């Protein structure tokens, strides 16, 4: 079974920032669930015009990681 690591909070462009890895390795299906959850979290919590990495930095990596890794069941708007 293929497993992947997930890194968040990285940034490219004028300012380059290396992301932080979430704890663990994930199957492709779980990784896709986490990515979807991250996008929904960003949509709900970002300040207009704020980049994802800046949102994670403002809220705190540990807080975002905990949210993303908890309840990896099916995602619904109510889950968030």
Image (cartoon, rainbow, N blue to C red):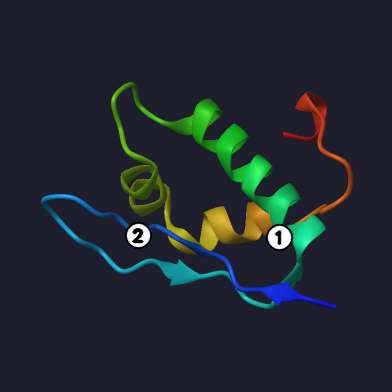
Q: Residue furthest front?
A: 2
Give the side of residue 32 with respect to residue 19, left or right: right
- Residue at image position (31%, 46%) is 54
**Is 63 or 15 nearer to us in this picture?**
15
Can you give x and y, in whole percent of width and height, for residue 26 in the image? 74, 70
Query: On screen, 31 above or below 20?
Result: above
- Residue at image position (71%, 60%) is 69
What residue does disc 1 label? 69
Give the side of residue 64 with respect to residue 67, left or right: left
Query: On screen, 63 above or below 38?
Result: below
Can you give x and y, in whole percent of width and height, for residue 52 in the image? 39, 42
Image-quadrant location for residue 74: top right
Can you give x and y, in whole percent of width and height, for residue 62 in the image? 51, 64
Of label 1 and label 2, which has the lower sequence position?
A: 2
- Residue at image position (60%, 73%) is 5
- Residue at image position (19%, 61%) is 16
- Circle 2 SS class: loop
**Is 64 or 73 nearer to us in this picture?**
73
Q: Quadrant of the N terminus?
A: bottom right
What residue does disc 2 label? 10
């Amino acid at each position: 079974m293929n497993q992947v690591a997930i890194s968040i909070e990285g940034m490219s462009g004028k300012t380059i920032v290396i992301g932080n890895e979430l704890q663990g390795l994930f199957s492709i299906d779980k990784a896709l669930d986490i990515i979807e959850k991250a996008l929904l979290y960003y949509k709900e919590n970002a300040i207009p015009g704020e980049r994802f990495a800046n949102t994670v930095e403002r809220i705190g990596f540990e807080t975002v990681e905990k949210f993303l890794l908890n309840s990896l069941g099916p995602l619904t708007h109510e889950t968030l």
